[in-house]
Image: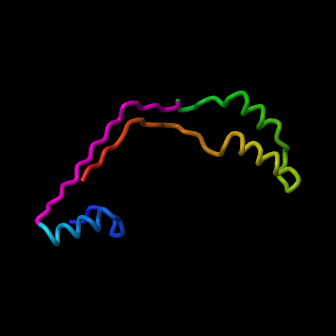
Amino acid sequence: LMLAGTNSKLADYSMEKTKSDKFSFASVSMSCEYYSYRVSGSPKLHQEFSKAANRLPKVYSSGTKQHFYKLIDTFGTHYITKVKLGGDVHSV
């Protein structure tokens, strides 16, 4: 029975004990989802983002790329559409 990756301390410990003693191991896991949230199907853009996007140059080039990089640095490239809050507990 392998409980973890072959290079993990948990795997080494459990293999050592099962070979030398009469140990047995059990793995217990529990997870809980306490809250969940999702964005509506067609979210509106925030006013600050819209203004910043409208200020971008019409053409991307080596001379204008810093304007685009600044927008990405400020607002990022992704947004979250769904999140689940809770936790996981694993015991061996």
Q: Is residue 91 above or below residue 53?
A: below
What residue is shown at x 33% (from left), y 69% (from top)? 6
Asked if 88 appears above or below 62 in the picture, the reply is above
The percent coordinates of residue 8 (x first, y second) are: 35, 65
Residue 20, quarter of picture: bottom left
Q: Residue furthest left?
A: 22
Residue 10 x %, y %: 30, 62
Please give the range of residues in magenta: 22-39
Q: Count how many numbered circles sit on residues in the image.
A: 0
Q: Is residue 86 left or right of residue 70?
A: left
Q: Nearer the viewer, residue 36 or 87?
A: 87
Looking at the image, which residue sits at the far bottom? Answer: 19
Asked if residue 74 lies left or right of residue 17, the reply is right
- Whole-percent x and y of residue 1? 20, 66
Residue drawn 88% across and 53% down?
63
Q: Position of residue 2 (x, y in %)?
A: 25, 65
Front residue of 26/34: it is: 26
Horizontal side of 29 relative to 53 (left or right) equals left
